[in-house]
């Protein structure tokens, strides 16, 4: 029944009821309170957070870089360890074999490259000074014209005094190498030990960390995500390492059999090309400059001097435009602009090691973002 109300005279009245078909229930008309929007950080706060993270990465590089290098080497060795595990070799022994084999191969290669590297470092300054003298004779007329113009300008301004050259000297520190050597050795040992422990105990640590999650369903999803990321990233790093090694070997073979460079020196330039190829765009640009310097130091004529740089550029173009996209596909590709920015940031913060680690870190971030709901757009932004 409708509610009985009284008017100002005290007579009972009934409220008017809308019986039209468009009438809506009173409860439906009542406005529902809207949820409060989540507070969003301001642009200034985001900029400060990015700057603080960047400063932390730069200031703590002595702690962060050994860990990242160990994880990188462990990712490279994980496919080999999995292959050895299929032969019923225990993980501890498989990791030890991979680590000892890698150290032995690096030692043998370094022993082969040490002598040609020292010889080239001794010969290059003399040759470059000779090249500088030849170039100075070509540009001497321009320098003479500049000096004449400077004298005329000085006379016109009334300044007849001689130009004063300021020579700055820097005292040599004979103990600098002695004090830096133990730190460098300690860093190398830390990387080796961390790599071994990541290879052996990485899975156990991952399993215990996943056990901290509250529900079994979340644990299962996290295991699938981490296994797929580890498999994809380790395959990427291992494949890129093999491709770069093949590029270095091909360059060394062409330099030796095609241009007559001795085997140790050819291996030196092949190894440098392999390492530089881990840093896209920046590494090959540095490689071309080094190949030009090597050509001008080794040959007197212009034509043969340009051949090493041309060969290196051709190999890199073939690898970057055909081999790598064909082997890895588009899912591992990264945006060139994002790559350049990452190389600038990591190179500024961590130097050469940052240039080597920039691409693997970006690939890891991209695979993580692609596996998390709601963050796939950021993965597409990276490439």
Image (cartoon, grey):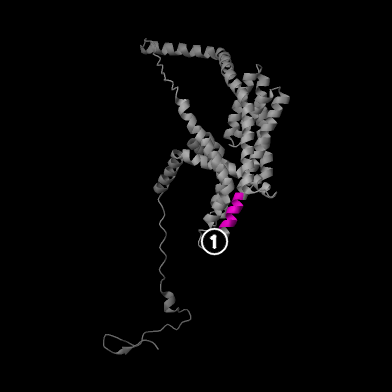
Percent x, y of residue 132: 56, 16
Residue 55 horizontal side relative to residue 355, left or right: left
Considering every residue shown, the one lying at the far left of the view is 9
Q: Nearer the viewer, residue 78 or 46?
A: 78
- Tell me: 135 left or right of 57: right
The residue that mark 1 highlights is 218
Tell which of 153 and 131 is nearer to you.
Answer: 131
Residue 136, visible in the rendered structure: yes
Q: Is residue 237 visible?
A: no
Q: Where on the picture, by quarter, is residue 110?
A: top right
| Between 309 and 155, the one nearer to me in the picture | 309
Q: Residue at x 64, y 41 (%)?
A: 97
Could you say where residue 192 lies in the image, as x and y percent from the top left? 56, 39
In reply to whether residue 226 is colored magenta, the answer given is yes
Q: Answer with the quarter of the image where residue 32 lies.
A: bottom left
- Let me know if residue 113 is in the magenta part: no
Above or below — where is 9 with respect to 361?
below
Q: Residue at x 64, y 19 (%)?
A: 298
What stretch of residues is rendered in magenta?
Answer: 222-230
Task: Please tell me whether mark 1 sits on a helix, a strand or a loop.
Answer: helix
Find residue 360 and report its horizontal and vertical position in percent: 57, 43
Q: Position of residue 301 (x, y in %)?
A: 66, 17
Front-lying residue, 9 or 362: 362
Locate residue 290 relative to residue 23 in the image: left or right: right
Image quarter in which the N terminus is found: bottom left
Question: In the image as oriented, which residue stretches furthest toward the right?
Answer: 257
Q: Count residues near mark 1 (Cα–Cα under 10 Å), then give few for <14, some for 14-19, many for 20+.
A: few
Q: Main secondary structure of the magenta part?
A: helix
């Amino acid at each position: 029944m409708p509610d009985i109300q009284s008017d100002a005279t005290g007579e009972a009245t009934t409220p008017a009821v809308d019986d039209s078909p468009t009438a809506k229930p009173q409860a439906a008309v009542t406005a529902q309170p809207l949820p409060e929007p989540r507070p969003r950080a301001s642009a200034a706060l985001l900029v400060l957070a990015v700057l603080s993270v960047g400063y932390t990465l730069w200031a703590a590089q002595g702690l962060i870089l050994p860990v990242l290098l160990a994880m990188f080497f462990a990712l490279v060795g994980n496919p080999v360890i999995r292959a050895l595990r299929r032969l019923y070799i225990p993980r501890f022994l498989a990791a030890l074999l991979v680590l000892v084999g890698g150290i032995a191969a690096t030692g043998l290669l370094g022993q082969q490259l040490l002598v040609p590297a020292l010889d080239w470092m001794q010969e290059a300054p003399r040759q470059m000074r000779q090249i500088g003298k030849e170039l100075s004779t070509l540009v001497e007329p321009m320098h003479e014209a500049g000096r004449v113009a400077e004298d005329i300008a000085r006379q016109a301004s009334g300044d007849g005094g001689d130009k004063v050259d300021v020579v700055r000297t820097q005292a040599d520190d004979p103990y600098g190498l002695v004090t830096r050597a133990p730190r460098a050795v300690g860093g190398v040992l830390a990387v080796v030990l961390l790599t071994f422990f990541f290879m052996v105990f990485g899975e156990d640590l991952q399993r215990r960390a996943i056990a901290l999650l509250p529900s079994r369903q979340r644990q299962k999803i996290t295991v699938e995500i981490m296994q797929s990321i580890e498999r994809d990233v380790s395959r990427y790093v291992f494949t890129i390492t093999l491709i770069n090694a093949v590029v270095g070997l091909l360059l060394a073979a062409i330099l030796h059999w095609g241009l007559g460079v001795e085997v140790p020196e050819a291996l030196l330039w092949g190894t440098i090309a392999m390492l530089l190829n881990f840093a896209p765009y920046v590494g090959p640009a540095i490689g071309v400059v080094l190949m030009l310097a090597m050509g001008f130091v080794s040959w007197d004529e212009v034509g043969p001097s340009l051949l090493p740089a041309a060969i290196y550029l051709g190999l890199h173009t073939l690898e970057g435009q055909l081999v790598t996209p064909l082997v890895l596909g588009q899912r591992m590709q990264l945006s060139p602009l994002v790559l350049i920015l990452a190389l600038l940031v990591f190179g500024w913060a961590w130097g050469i090691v940052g240039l080597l680690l920039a691409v693997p870190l970006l690939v890891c971030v991209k695979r993580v973002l692609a596996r998390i709901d709601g963050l796939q757009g950021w993965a597409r932004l990276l490439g």
